[in-house]
Image (cartoon, helix red, strand yellow):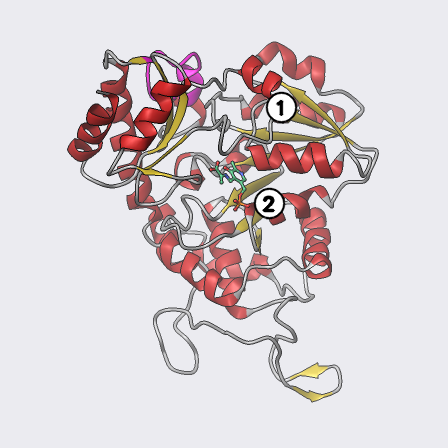
Amino acid sequence: MASHFGNPEERLKPFLSLGFSSRAIHGGQHPDPVTGAVMPPIYQNSTYAQSEAGKPIGEFEYSRTHNPTRRVLEDALALLENGTFGLAMSSGMAATSLLISLFQPGDEIVCCDDVYGGTYRLFTKVLEAQGYKFRFVDLSDVGQIEQSITQNTKLVWLETPTNPLLKLIDIRKVAARAKAVGAKVVVDNTFMSPYFQKPLDLGADFVLHSLTKYINGHSDVVGGAIITRDKVAAERLYFLQNSIGAVLGPFDSWLVVRSIKTLPVRMKAHGESAQLLAEWLEKHPKVEKVIYPGLKSHPQHTLAREQMSGFGGMLSFYLKGGLAEAQAVLRKVKVFTLAESLGGVESLIEHPAIMTHASVPQHIREKNGIADSFLRVSVGLEDLADLKKDLDEAFS
Ligand code: P1T
């Protein structure tokens, strides 16, 4: 494959024998040929000299089209997801928009009924007006998979675990059904990261990430990505990436490349703390119910064990009481920060109904269980004792 994205299949070859942690540290990277620098340089520039019109001196022409630092990140992401082609965008929503651009107004897209509020807003307030047809279905209910994905379906959009209710969807079953009717499947893998879940290995056609979350992991970059093995789709995606233009800049690409090196150790620690915090919360007298895929009480704990290699750092819970009790907890926390987003080294807590999922109409939120007493937690890497103490004090 030779065009502005070069030949990813060849570029990835030297790294294919490496395990996940080695890929996280070395993926897509070689010592700089000019200086020997071990870390990839930040090519903070927009354009590249040509020796005569149409003949660039090197491989690169213009940084929207391709940039060496962004390319390192795109290759590293492809390697982590066991994919071949990576594309880095300026936000998770830009990656979502790019993926949807593969499809046409009039196409039917089946989407799980619990997704990030911004994704729901883009689908219902922007893309439906352009003619795309969305059907929101509870795909965590296996019986609905066959019923809802039909010959009319062009794309199936999954978050698993879903944001914020942490429902799981059987990726293998959805992929098999989609294949039977000629539809494509995308999994938004933001909550698990490739450390805990590899959707392409389970039959998905595309993986999508908000890099803003675990992959960057330090709450200092907004970015997004798509990864695929599908060469035909990748050629079109690279064309669209250049045409639409919402690409990730060189410095942000470099920050994410640096962060990925610690993704395995961070994810392991996030998962360990989240499991212990979920078990502790489940026994707390002020807590009505905890949702975490690693708890035996999670209705899809068995599926979690089958399709994920860990349970992640996100948990949600219902407090006893209502909005007043929830607001009081959010006002009182000191180690947790009350903020949107997730996946950083610091613990965050938020109120989905008022914050991240305010774009979802109230009747749908209520039907799904996004109640006033419902809180979502991104478990960071602080001492677990401090996190427990902080919540305990906020509850009382
Ligand atoms: O914020 P951005 O990088 O554009 O990513 C959007 C996005 C996509 N997919 C999932 C699963 C997400 O959670 C998000 C962003 N989510 C939040 C900001 C949040 O607090 O849930």
The kind of secondary structure element at disc 2 is helix
Q: Quadrant of residue 286?
A: top left
Q: Does the magenta run of residues contain 291?
A: yes
Q: Is residue 305 visible?
A: yes
**Residue that carries the numbered disc 2 in the rendered image:** 93
- Decide: is 114 above or below 20: above
Tell me, yes or no, whether the two marked residues, 2 and 1, touch with CB atoms within 8 Å: no
- 327 and 151: which is toward the camera: 327
* Label 1 neighbour load within 10 Å: few <14, some 14-19, many 20+: few
The magenta stretch is 288-304
Q: Which quadrant of the figure contains the N terminus?
A: bottom right
Please name which of the two marks, 2 or 1, marks the residue nearer to the observer.
1
Residue ID at (75%, 86%) = 53
Residue 279 is labelled as none
Residue 325 locus on image (x, y percent):
34, 19
- 244 and 262: which is toward the camera: 244
User: What amino acid is labelled 1 in the image?
Assistant: Pro
Closer to the chain start, of discs 2 and 1, is: 2
327 sits to left or right of 76? left
User: What amino acid is labelled 2 in the image?
Assistant: Met
**Residue that carries the numbered disc 1 in the rendered image:** 361
Residue 318 locus on image (x, y percent):
38, 16
